[in-house]
Amino acid sequence: MASMGAAPDHLFNLRNQFYLGAYQTAINNSEIPHLSPEDAVERDCLVFRSYIALGSYQLVISEIDESAATPLQAVKLLAMYLSSPANKESTISSLREWLADSTIGNNATLRLVAGIVFMHEEDYSEALKHTHAGGTMDLHALNVQIFIKMHRSDYAEKQLGVMQQYDEDHTLTQLATAWFNLAVGGSKIQEAYLIFQDFCEKYPMTCLILNGKAVCCMQMGNFDEAESLLLEALNKDAKDPETLANLVVCSLHVGKSSSRYLSQLKLSHPEHVLVKRVSSAEDNFERAVQSVA
């Protein structure tokens, strides 16, 4: 993970592909010659995180062995956490142990993984304990996400300011600006839309870019445009959870049935927040019906 202030580097394209959700492209283009040992570790982290994003957890777990560098061990922990809800507790306790170890606890990738895991757990104050000091663009971008989830756009804006000061044109700065604008809403949504539009013109379309643009459209009430963007994303990856979740919402607004998308989401991502919300609504409905019957 590049530290802030690093010179132009060999991993620029690979990092961009990962940030924008072109995970398979990143994996396919990861054979980069003449990397320093440190860059080689970062390259491997980006490749393994791309596999994680594609759901190939077992591959990551089996490929990274005990002798690998700390950042790679951290990425392996993330794969273990995501692969098995049953073993979540033991993965989290290993994570806490490593964070408490003064020799590795301050490693930027380990802190990033801690932030991602605790954000998944919705334990935002624990996540921030490890991420708030920043030090890399990835950590600052994660802080923006965490503060948005906490509905603290004032703190998100401060983190964004740090990123803009360092590199306004950085892909993560642009992405974080779009997330922030979406969270603030109002006239800012048009600005977020333009950021995703800019990505569309500069880079190959990915589910991440298409979903970003579609969410902007939905918030502006342009559900027909949103639907066509989401169907394009579905063509790229029929199991992408964000695409399916956004299609559920969008279908309701354009007056179409959303049940097929919801069924697909339930099957492929039973832990998704939308699935949980619908399930609890269904349970409440069942209970209500039974109490009347």
Image (spheres, helix red, strand yellow):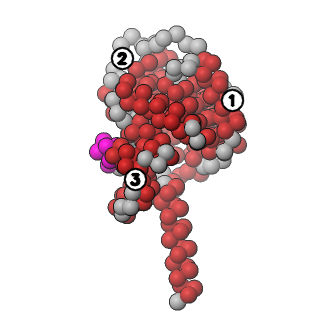
Residue for point 50% across, 17% down: 38
In the rendered image, the vertical position of residue 54 relative to residue 267, given as above or below? above
Label 3 secondary element? helix
Tell me which secondary structure the magenta stretch mostly adopts.
helix
Q: Earlier in the sequence, mark 1 or mark 2?
A: 2
Is 20 in front, or is 228? Answer: 228
**What is the distance, in whole Å, between disc 3 and disc 1 at their CAs?**
33 Å
Give the magenta part as a residue range.
230-238
What x and y, as percent, mark residue 6? 55, 13
Label 2 environment density (alpha carbons within 10 Å; few <14, some 14–19, many ≥20): few
Report which residue position mark 1 lands on.
158
**What is the distance, in whole Å, between disc 1 and disc 2 at their CAs?**
35 Å
Is 255 in front, or is 26? Answer: 255
Label 1 environment density (alpha carbons within 10 Å; few <14, some 14–19, many ≥20): some
Q: Is residue 163 left or right of residue 56?
A: right
Q: Amino acid at mark 2?
A: Ile
Report whether residue 58 is seen: no
Report which residue position mark 2 lands on.
32
Report whether residue 36 is seen: yes
Point out the frontmost of discs 3 and 2: 3
Label 3 environment density (alpha carbons within 10 Å; few <14, some 14–19, many ≥20): many
The stretch drawn in magenta includes residue 237: yes
Is 19 in front, or is 261? Answer: 261
Report which residue position mark 3 lands on.
247
Q: Earlier in the sequence, mark 3 or mark 2?
A: 2
What x and y, as percent, mark residue 91? 56, 46
Q: Amino acid at mark 3?
A: Leu
Q: Amino acid at mark 1?
A: Lys
Callouts 3 and 1 close, C-beta under 8 Å: no
In the rendered image, the vertical position of residue 277 relative to residue 135, given as above or below? below
